[in-house]
Image (cartoon, rainbow, N blue to C red):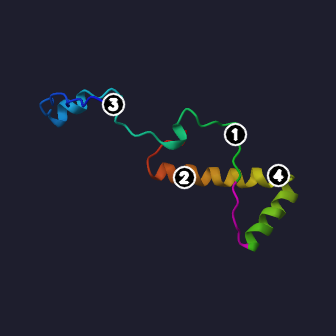
Amino acid sequence: MAIKMPGRRQPPVSPEEFIAGATAAPESQKPTLPWQDPRVRDDLRVQLNTKLPERLSIQIEYLHRQLNREKQDIVEEALRAWVRQQLKALDLPSD
């Protein structure tokens, strides 16, 4: 089998030239928020398993019966309000 000689080396390029020549360079340097990813679906439901203090759990159960609303809807509404408040405090969009 023949031995091949390595080709001539190219002169070194500056970091700026190297970056400018990149084909997969991001179009925007602005970071995107995870919930703004176009692959995130509003119709997909994700299960959240968590432990609650007994008193809170009983209060949710009580409201579920009194208001005739699903526990899931009660918890989702409360979490959504809290998340919006936290994002607003951080000056981030909720949508």
**Is 52 part of what is drawn in magenta?**
yes
Kindly identify the residue that appears in the image at 44 percent across and 51 percent down: 90
Q: Earlier in the sequence, mark 1 or mark 4?
A: 1
Spot occupied by residue 8 in the image (x, y as percentages of width and height):
15, 28
Crowding near the residue tagged with mark 3, few <14, some 14–19, many ≥20 C-alpha atoms within 10 Å: few
Alpha carbons under labels 1 and 4: distance apart? 18 Å
Tell me which amino acid carries mark 4: Glu
Q: Amino acid at mark 2?
A: Gln
Outermost residue to the left: 11
Taking 62 as reference, is 84 left or right? left
Residue 70's disc is: 4
Residue 17: x and y in percent read 18, 30
Comes first in the chain, label 3 or label 1:
3
Observer-nearest of 66 and 82: 82
> Label 4, label 2: how many angstroms apart (C-alpha)?
23 Å
Contact? badges 4 and 2 (CB < 8 Å): no
Label 2 near label 3: C-beta < 8 Å? no
Residue bearing mark 3: 25
Left or right, 4 with reference to 53: left
Residue 85 numbered mark, or none: 2
Residue lying at 87% horizontally and 58% vertically, measured from the top left? 66
Distance CA(mark 1)–CA(mark 2): 23 Å
Crowd rating for badge 2 (residues with CA inside 10 Å; few <14, some 14–19, many 20+): some
Residue 34 is situated, as x and y percent measured from the top left of the image, at 51, 43
Res 51 → quadrant: bottom right
Along the polypeptide, which appears first: circle 4 or circle 2?
Answer: 4
